Structure formats: C-alpha cells, structure tokens
Amino acid sequence: MVVYETDLPRVGKKFDLDLDRNAKLVVVVHNTGKRELFLQEPSECDPKKLFEASEETANQLGTIMEGTYFQSVRDETISTVLDRDALLEWVRVAETSALVDETIVESGLLETDASIIAIQRGSETIQNPDPETTLRGGDTLVAIGDRRSHAALEAIASGEAADRSDREES
Amino acid sequence: MAETTLFELGVVFAVIAFGGAVANRTGQSVVPFYLVVGILASEHVLGRLGSLGVGDAALSVHPYVTESEFVALGAELGVVFLLFFLGLEFSVDRLAAHGDDIGKAGLVDLGINFPIGVALGLLFGWRPIEAVLLGGIVYISSSAVTTKSLLDLGWIANDESGPLLGTLVFEDLAIAVYLAIVSAVVLGGGGVAAAATEIVLAVAFLGALVGLAHFGTGLFRRLLAVDSRELTVLRAVAITVSIAGFAVTIDVSEAVAAFFVGMGFSSTGHVHELEELLSPLRDVFAAVFFFWIGLTTNPWLFADPAIVGAIAVTVLATTPAKLVSGFLGGRIYDLDDRHSFRVGVGMVTRGEFSLIIATIAQAGATPVLAETIPAIAVGYVLVTSVLGTALMQYSDPLWSIVEPYSVTGR
C-alpha cells in the first residue's frame, strides 16, 4: 500500500492512503496534536471530513485499529492514566516469577523504564522502597511508566518473561 | 507619546478582545477587526467624540486610547514574535525537498504581483523607494488569515493546501530579504551613498545572523535544554528580543533579525515546545500590533478621495493579479482548474506583512512615506482581508461562474 505524505508548513502533515474502489483516505496531523480524517470518494470533487480527534484519542484509536489495544487491558491489572506517557499500574508478583527473593537492584527492574513507587505486602505498604528491598511472591508492585514499560514489567512479574523474549526474537 | 496607566492598558486589551470576539462570531479573520477597534479607540475617532462632549467629562482619564510608548513597544514585540514564528517554522530542508515546485510557484507569484505594485506606485507619481514599498505591500499574502481559512473551510485536506502553503513559505523568505534591504534604505533616510552603507551594514549583520542560525544550533539547544518551562520561555524571549532590539539600534529591521533567530531555533528540536510556549505571547502582542496600527491611522485620511481612489485602484489591479498568479501556481503543482482557482482565491488576502511594511514606511521622511502609504496599506488590508475570506467561502459558486471561461479545460 502506498501512503503519500505532504508537508503542510505551519499546519502539520497530510497523509493520503488509497482505499478500494479508487476512494482515498486523507489524514491531517496538526502540529497542535489534533488529527482530522477525510474520505475522498471517487465521484466527489473534494474530500469529506469524517471526524476530528485529539492526539490522545487518535493514539488509542490507532492501537485499536492495529489490534494491540485489548492486550493492555487485562483483568488482573488496575491502571490509572496520568497522562499520555504515564500510567500508574498495580502489578502482582506471581510465586513463579523470577522476581521472587530478588532485591529490586538484582531483579533488573531499575533498568526498565517503569519505576516502582510502592510495594503492597499484605496489609502493609512500603512507600518508596529501598533498592535493597527483597521482593516476595504475592507482593503487589505499584509502578509508574508508559504502556510499553508496564507490559515489560508485567511480563516479568507474572513469570512470562522467558516466553515473551522468545516471541520477540522470532 | 504619553504614559500608560494600568487602567488604560486594561481598556486596550478589553477592546482588542471585543474585536476578536466579533470576528469569531462573524466567521471573519481577526486582523481587520483589531485594526478597526484600534481606529475607533484612537484620538481621531473616540478623541473627537470626547471633545464634542459625548465623552464622560467626569472620567479622570481621557476617553480615548493614546499612542503610548507601551502600546508602541508591545506592537514592536508583536512584529518580532510574528517573524520569529515564521523563522521557527521555516525549514530549509523542506524548501530543498519541495524546492522545485515551491520555487516555480513562488517566482510566478513574485514576478506577477510585485511589479504591479511598483508600477502602481510610479503611476501615482511616487518616488521609486515609495513605489517599491507598495510593491511589497501588494505582493505579500497573509499567512495568518489564509492558514486560518484553510483550516476553517476544511481545505487543508484538499490538493490546493500544498501549493498555497508552499507559496506562502516562499513569500516569507522573500519578505525577510526584502525587509532587510528596504528598511535599510528607508531608515537610512538619505541619499544613495548613505543607503549603500546602510545596506552593507544590514547585509553584514544579517550574514552574521544567518551564520548564528546555522552554526549556533548547538548553543541554542544547550540554552533551551533546561528542565523548566519558565526558563525555556525566558531564555527564548531574551535571545530573540535582545537580538532584534540590537538590530534596531543599527537600523536593521527587528522583524528580519527575529526571523533569523527563529530559523536558528528551528533546528534545535525544541520547535514544538517553543511553539506551544510562545504562541500565547505572539497572539497577545500581534493583536497589540494590529491595534496599534489602527490607533496610529488617521481615519479622516480615508475621506480624502485621492487615498480612497488609490486604495480602490490597488485592490482592483492586484486582486485579479493574485488570482492569476495563484492559478498558475496551482497548475505548476499539477492541480486541475478548479483547485488551481482556489489557490488563487486563497492568496488574495493581505495582512500582517503588508502592515509591517507600512510601519517601515511610517518611519520615512516624506509625506507619502509617513502618511499616504500607511493609510493605503491599512485600507488595502481591511478590504483584501475581508474580500479574501469571502472569496474563499464562496469559491464554489464563483467557480461555476468562471468555469465556462476556463482555458485549459481540466
């Protein structure tokens, strides 16, 4: 599929996608973040505006269209969106996870982009945990980060990390 | 020049905000409305009403807005920020990538409209430099008004948006060079020798600025890479305004200096951030600029048949010229006749830059420079900004009238 890209100085960028039946989809990405979607029917002279969306809505729409959105909402996780790049998420450490009996430093969690801001252990909450804190199975990690780093953290915490890296390599 | 009280300043912004609200309500661009409220609030209109006894004598302040130093400085800041943004959004890479079409369409635009303006000036019996100023005023279309109409009408997704915005970019670069030369000549104010020295000085200073824009990217980037919005804004404003202000002290146009500073910032990777942080400043001070232009315009000049005649002749001659040059520009981009026609229609509006040229003329010594050209520019911008917006809104019915005469039949 060919996507034609046109620069719109002072406005943003325009993308033209050819659809079936000689119809054309026009996406205008404004510098302000706003997105507009137009449909050009072959019989019409000018494209018709379908809708406009904010950057945030458009990004979510994008992940839905891509078929990846549903993966980020799992039943066992609770998340709060702070802004586009920052989500607050609660992640449970499974007994089988590689994190069990590791300190935060040893676990390699510091290298991911998600930061652990608290650990809930039973009725106790450890705020701002020390890097030497040892993690246990059944802990709930409260972490802040973007969607991607949360996905990585979740994979490690649930014990699926090995699986996951295999998949990425293939 | 008088001192501004805080209350008076509040009135200024209230009046500007009112003008903007009316513009929004009527679907027009804000530029002509800021101009009109400036004219109405001035000593020439409100001041006269006041002296006729209509104004409230009990008010301790005079009932009109004076051309105070603060408003004048605010207007100057408006010019600086307008041009700074042009520079910021100007990309040499983009020009290089689409240079062929932009260059051709831009040259057609320049080659048709600028000479017509100069010829009109000479026809009015003006001196060459005065005619060249009129050439600039009629040549440069309004990026602000045209871009807003493009967005409002949804033309942005259409084929005509490329050539329209591309030609405007070409005009921006042309006007930066033009302002540099013209302001040196006018502000130098003297004979050929003095003008030559001024031009050499201006070119040397601008050369230094281009060098800074090109090689100073690293420096600018470091200066802007602070983790505080406050400091980023302050630093950007400090650099821009001080360089532009220094330019004025050596008789170089502050507008041009600001353009090149903007260009210097454009490759720092902070463009988006700067746009977001500084656009409120630009909007506020650009509004003050338009208001100030209205304030300094004596509307009674519009009662002078010679001025009105000159405005009418200029509009009648240059509107079709823009329609033709825009149409040809559209054809260069391979558009069909209908969309090419729209490119022409979109170019009719003149605005901020014509007024900036008028302020340069205002600083000149002859009566034509100081009074006639600014008045013509204001009248001309008022007419073309309203006319241009209307033409864009009614371009489809207009096209059905013009279509039968279409030469190329595409």
Image: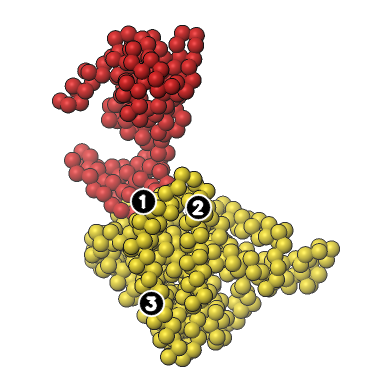
Chain colours: A red, B yellow
Callout 3: chain: B
Q: Is residue B68 rendered to the left or right of residue A50?
A: right
Label 1 is found on which chain of the structure? B
| Rendered image: mark on residue B233 | 2
Whether discs 1 and 3 lie on one chain: the answer is: yes
* One can see residue B345 in this view: no
Inspect the image, locate mark 1, and give the three-letter code of the amino acid beneath it: Gly
Circle 2: element type: helix
Q: Which residue is mark 3?
A: B203
Image position of A142 (left or right of B64): left
Task: Determine the residue located farthest toward the left in the rendered image.
Answer: A170
Residue projecting furthest to the front? A132
| CA gap, disc 1 and disc 2 | 15 Å
Percent position of residue A124, x then y: 49, 11
Residue topped by disc 1: B269
Question: Circles 3 and 2: CB distance less than 8 Å?
Answer: no
The image shows residue B170 at horizontal and vertical percentages of: 34, 66
Residue appearing at x 45%, y 65% in the figure: B258
Q: Is residue B100 left or right of residue B70?
A: left
- Using a 10 Å C-alpha cutoff, classify the residue at mark 2 as few (fewer than 14 neighbours), some (14 to 19) or many (20 or more): some
Return the mark for residue B306.
Answer: none
Question: Label 2 is placed on what type of residue?
Answer: Val
